[in-house]
Image: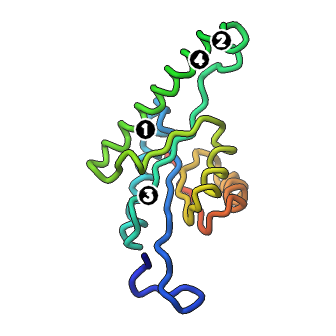
Amino acid sequence: MSVPGVAGASGQPAAIPRIACAIDASSEDLDMQALNRKVVEFALLIASCLESDSPTLLHAWVPFAERAVRKYAVDDEFAAYLEKARQRAGSSLTRIARSFEGQFDARATVLRRGEPQEVIPEFVVSEGIDMLVMGTVARWRDLRDAHREHRRTGAQEVALLRGDG
């Protein structure tokens, strides 16, 4: 598919961009929840303007106190702990996706275990994402560093939205 009326470098119609938005679905912080919503709304707006498919909704999750639990738990207990943490993260992601009333299906939501600074760039490269939309609660001078980090992922464009908190 191509974007109507938009030509690529070769003069041919430009390919429809693959868009992803990275959110922290597990956060209970109200400011972070508001930022998540802003990120998803912006990604949906971009997708609509470009007549692209719905963006992929990505949540990178890390089990709380994973090292401590691993140190003191036996293998079966640790596996059960990880599974419960995965289910909680998945439920949080599903809840956010459903709050957008059918704009996302199961294929458009991705749950990946690991630190966001590692998971997000790997996902962008492996899935051929053209545009990444994500939020930051960092101070404005930190935006420059975050932008540089995510530009190395291979995404053609990175949109960073600042939280109000």
Determine whether the residue tagged by mark 4 lies in a helix, strand or loop. Answer: helix
- Classify 94 as above or below 143: above
What amino acid is found at the position of numbered circle 2 in the picture?
Asp
**In this rendering, does residue 120 appear at all?**
yes
Residue 102 as seen in the image, left or right of residue 44: left
Marks 2 & 4, CB-CB < 8 Å contact: yes
Query: What amino acid is at disc 3?
Result: Pro
- The mark nearer the N terminus, 1 or 2, is 2
Mark 3 lies on residue: 55
State the image coordinates of residue 8 (x, y, percent, origin top left): 54, 85
Determine which residue is flagged by label 4: 79
Sequence-first disc among 1 and 4: 4
**Gap in angstroms between the C-alphas marked 3 and 4:** 31 Å
Q: Residues within 10 Å of mark 4 (few under 14, many from 20)?
A: few
Q: Residue type at mark 4?
A: Ala
* Residue at image location 58% in from the left, 48% down from the top: 136
Question: Residue 18, percent across and down?
Answer: 50, 64
Q: Which residue is mark 1?
A: 93
Left or right position of 87 against 157? left
Q: Is residue 110 above or below residue 133?
A: above
Q: Is residue 113 left or right of residue 87?
A: right
Tell me, yes or no, whether the two marked residues, 3 and 2, touch with CB atoms within 8 Å: no
Q: Is residue 102 left or right of residue 1?
A: left
Residue drawn at point x = 50 percent, y = 53 percent? 21
Disc 1 on helix, strand or loop? helix
Which-is-in-front pick, marks 3 and 4? 4
Q: Are marks 1 and 2 in contact (CB under 8 Å)?
A: no
Tag shown at residue 75: 2
Report the quarter where the N terminus lies.
bottom left
Kindly state the secondary structure of the residue where label 3 is placed: loop
Q: Earlier in the sequence, mark 3 or mark 2?
A: 3
